[in-house]
Amino acid sequence: MGSTAAPAFDRARFLAAAHTPAQLPPDEGAEVAIAGRSNAGKSSAINALTRAGLARTSKQPGRTRQIVLFALGEGMRLADLPGYGYARVPRALQAHWERFLDRYLRTRASLRGLVLVMDVRHPLREGDEALAAWCAAAGRPVHVLLTKADKLRRGPAMEALREVEAALGAIHPGATAQLFSARTRLGVDEARAVLARWLTGPR
């Protein structure tokens, strides 16, 4: 069964930061994870979708080093996953993240879908395709946010969107994608609608 209440995006609040599976909130309700390469604009996207300042942004890539969870009301959560693809992360810590995230993505019963954040100027880089393919194999829905769309003119941005949609079709046939800009708020309502459908719909 799904929730009858809409996600309270504008009243989102910090819930927990988990460095190990035992630190995660109880595996109940509905959860959407947000993932992306370091510096793809993930924290800015979360702030645009919820309320300003909720997720920490930084000019230094790789600052998110835990799964950070935000409550959206009535058993609904956003999970901010550690950014990947940043070489300066210590190898031991990177290995820990990989084991933790693999377990989280494979076994988290409340996980309804994954929002995959990519810079529209550099989409589907190493790690992005692998994560989309894993979600396809696991039957997890994927929605791609092509962030920083304000950095391109509309024509090139739309072309990038079409290319990503075509490439995703071969990796995860059910995946969807959209243009997004945290600065101009382009695509915020569209992305919120996807998250609300996942969070409130039937399992």
Image (tube, grey):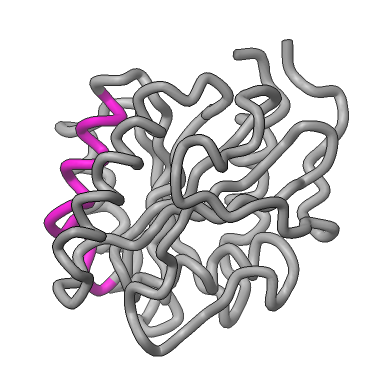
Can you say which quadrant of the picture contains the C terminus? top right
- Left or right, 179 with respect to 96, comes to right
Above or below 196: residue 19: below
Stretch of the chain drawn in magenta = 121-136
Considering every residue shown, the one lying at the far bottom of the view is 59
Above or below 37: residue 97: above
Q: Is residue 131 within the magenta segment?
A: yes
Q: Residue at x 18, y 33 (%)?
A: 171
Q: Residue at x 58, y 55 (%)?
A: 17
Quadrant position of residue 158: bottom left
- Left or right, 150 with respect to 175, comes to right
Q: Is residue 76 within the magenta segment?
A: no
Considering every residue shown, the one lying at the far top of the view is 1
Closer-to-camera residue (67/52) = 67
| Relative image position of residue 159 (x, y in whole percent) | 26, 62
Quadrant position of residue 185: bottom right
Can you say which quadrant of the picture contains the N terminus? top right
| Relative image position of residue 72 (x, y in whole percent) | 77, 46
Task: Tally the numbered discs.
Answer: 0
- Left or right, 160 with respect to 147, comes to left
- Left or right, 201 with respect to 7, comes to left
Q: Residue at x 33, y 73 (%)?
A: 62
Closer-to-camera residue (171/113) = 113
Q: Residue at x 49, y 65 (%)?
A: 180
Above or below 197: residue 144: below
| Relative image position of residue 184 (x, y in whole percent) | 60, 79
| Relative image position of residue 80 (x, y in whole percent) | 51, 54
